[in-house]
Amino acid sequence: MKRLLAVLMGAAIVCAVAYLVSLNEAHVDFHYAPARHFAQVHIVTLLVFAFIAGVLLVLLAVVLQAGRRSVATWGQTRRDRRSDRLDQWEEHGHQLVWQGEHQRGRTLLHRAWRRRPTSPQAVIALAESYRDTGETQRALQLLLGAMTQHHTNPDLLFALADTHRAAGDRVAELTTLERLLALHPRAVRVLRTLRDAYVDVGRWQDAVRLQEIVVAEVRDVQGAPLERQQLTWLRYQAAVAMPDVEARIRSLEALADGRAVPVPVSTSLGDALLAAGRGDEASMLWERALRTTPRTVLVERLAGMATEPRHRDRLRTLLGKLRPDQVHADHVRLLQAQLYLADGNATDAARILNGLQSSLDHPLLHRLWAEVHRRRGELDQAVAAYAQVSDAPCAYRCTRCERIVRGWTAHCPQCKSWDSYRSTVEIELPRSS
């Protein structure tokens, strides 16, 4: 079909030329330069020549365009093939590093980085492999060298900050993260990372400032309440860290202005009031908190400021009025017996201990019985009971990471959780998950 069309088109062109020749028999002089010409050239010949010349020029343009496209396609194919090979080197090198073959993996990553310095992913993976084996200085050299070409790359800045952290240089880590935040002031990942770094070094006000931006940026329905709770804890810690007592009280009172006041806020606010010489207010605050949220730390605070027997009587009465479905009854009895012994009343303390409903094997129980026996003059029983007492009968344990500390604290430095410490003699019943 195509051949037939070509034959028909050729015949049509021949017929058209013949028709033009029959109509145009005149001859002209064709000047191709001012002083040069062809004499008596048939006008149809000139037309045919012009047509053929035009066709040739069009064909030449088509050939040049096709050639340029072919060369570009060949170059792109070569670049793609080279890029795929470098990607394979990076991937394989990363896999080898994960498998523990550091030398082979680093060789591939080095090669990929040299061949493609425009992409920092290979050098990031390479630095990570050195950081994992404790060669932080070598990792820093690689990353700082890459920074000369990619000084605004966020992944590279993150890797550099992590390496500074691994090297123990917190100042350089913060400087790098602050530089990254200046480049991306609304990036939630950067805000959270720098916030956590501020928390680690105790810069609570700066952490609060960043968390306020995080709360404004997060749109997730489930994540937003968690971020607001995190903001509350950071504001609490910033308030506790204030050196001025009155300023500390004002900040904590602002956090306590609500229905459900967290126990750490109540505890620390009472501590601040007590430090300011406002013991009655502290006692009222802790008693109110104990009624709404029974916790051993509040009992310890109230017992610590109970200077007279009537104060301890009031505290024992308050413990006896706590709702049974909210407290561990035997742990409450242990604390009541401890208060009786503080009054020198070994008889009532023994009565309380004999009324325990479950078989406890707690260091505080043994210490209390030892003290009861000692005051009764039962020295053999006292020695036997003291022998079962450990060094820390009353301690606090993190419910997240199981870290144990001597005294109560609101923030766990190990797992970064808040309000997770509970006494080993905790009166609060554990919440069902």
Image (cartoon, grey):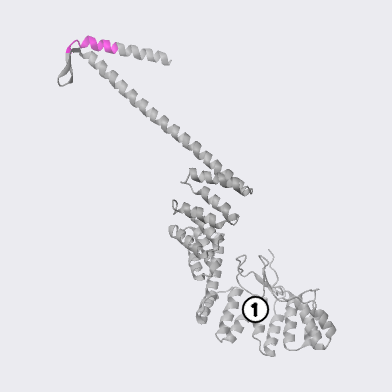
Which one is in front, 141 or 180? 141
Secondary structure under the numbered disc 1 in the rendered image = helix
Q: Position of residue 401 (x, y in %)?
A: 66, 65
Q: Residues within 10 Å of mark 1 (few under 14, many from 20)?
A: many
What residue span does the magenta drawing correspond to? 15-27
The answer to whether residue 422 is left or right of residue 111 is: right
Which one is in front, 291 or 341? 341
Q: Please tell me whether residue 25 belongs to the stretch shown in magenta.
A: yes
Q: Position of residue 26 (x, y in %)?
A: 17, 11
Q: Residue at (53%, 46%) from the top-left corner?
A: 110
Q: Residue at (14%, 19%) from the top-left corner?
A: 35
Q: Residue at (58%, 84%) from the top-left corner?
A: 274
The answer to whether residue 365 is left or right of residue 146 is: right
Q: Please tell me whether residue 204 belongs to the stretch shown in magenta.
A: no
Report the residue marked by disc 1.
298
Q: Position of residue 129 (x, y in %)?
A: 58, 52
Q: Is residue 257 visible?
A: no
The answer to whether residue 63 is left or right of residue 96 is: left
Q: Main secondary structure of the magenta part?
A: helix
Amino acid type of the residue tagged 1 in the rendering: Leu
The answer to whether residue 189 is left or right of residue 374 is: left
Quadrant of res 405:
bottom right
Quadrant of res 363:
bottom right
Outermost residue toward the left in this view: 35
* Relative height, residue 23 to residue 394 (above, below): above
Quarter of the picture holding the C terminus: bottom right
Give the number of marks. Answer: 1
Q: Is residue 41 visible?
A: yes
